[in-house]
Image (cartoon, rainbow, N blue to C red):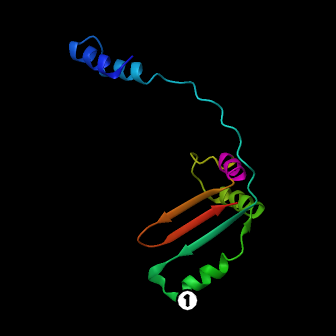
Amino acid sequence: MKSKKVLEQIESGELTAQEALNVLYPEVEPKLAKAGKRAHYIKMSVKVPEEGKGVNTFLRILFAIPIPMIFARIGLRFAERFVKEDDIDFTMIRNMLKYSRNTKIQVDTDDAQVDIAIH
């Protein structure tokens, strides 16, 4: 159905806005996503402009070597013991991290800049 015809039906009172939305954009049953490629390591870069050159140099040295995925998954298990919130599913996070190759995350705030690349 063409959008012009749907708009005319809304104007004449034949359709409500919700019905028009359903006509124009019918719900499609979601397809199961194929698993991505398996990730091997995580490369991080952290910059904190307010802390000065010494702290940024330390962070650059600390994250100079890529972190193997096994250590990241162990870190998540360790964090799971200390986080008391029920709405965080660490199993799902571990599985998403496991199959997230070629993902890049960039976080820029006033306090810090964090770049994460999963390879």
The structure residue drawn at horizontal position 52% and vertical position 76%, both measured from the top left corner, is 47
Give coordinates of residue 88: x percent, y percent.
Answer: 59, 48
**Residue 20 as seen in the image, left or right of residue 87:** left
Crowd rating for badge 1 (residues with CA inside 10 Å; few <14, some 14–19, many 20+): few
Q: What quarter of the picture does the N terminus occupy?
A: top left
Q: Quadrant of residue 12?
A: top left
The structure residue drawn at horizontal position 63% and vertical position 69%, both measured from the top left corner, is 44
Q: How many marks?
A: 1
The structure residue drawn at horizontal position 59% and vertical position 85%, both measured from the top left corner, is 57
Looking at the rendering, the stretch of residues picked out in magenta corresponds to: 92-100
Give coordinates of residue 91: x percent, y percent.
Answer: 69, 47
Give coordinates of residue 27: x percent, y percent.
Answer: 49, 23
Q: Quadrant of residue 104?
A: bottom right
User: Is label 1 in a helix, a strand or a loop?
Assistant: helix
Could you tell me the amino acid type at mark 1?
Answer: Gly
Give coordinates of residue 23: x percent, y percent.
Answer: 40, 18
Principal SS element in the magenta part? helix
**Residue 35, above or below 69:** above
Residue sitting at the far top: 14
The structure residue drawn at horizontal position 70% and vertical position 46%, both measured from the top left corner, is 36
Q: What quarter of the picture does the C terminus occupy?
A: bottom right
**Residue 1 as seen in the image, left or right of residue 35:** left
Residue sitting at the far left: 12
- Residue pointed to by mark 1: 54
Q: Quadrant of residue 116?
A: bottom right
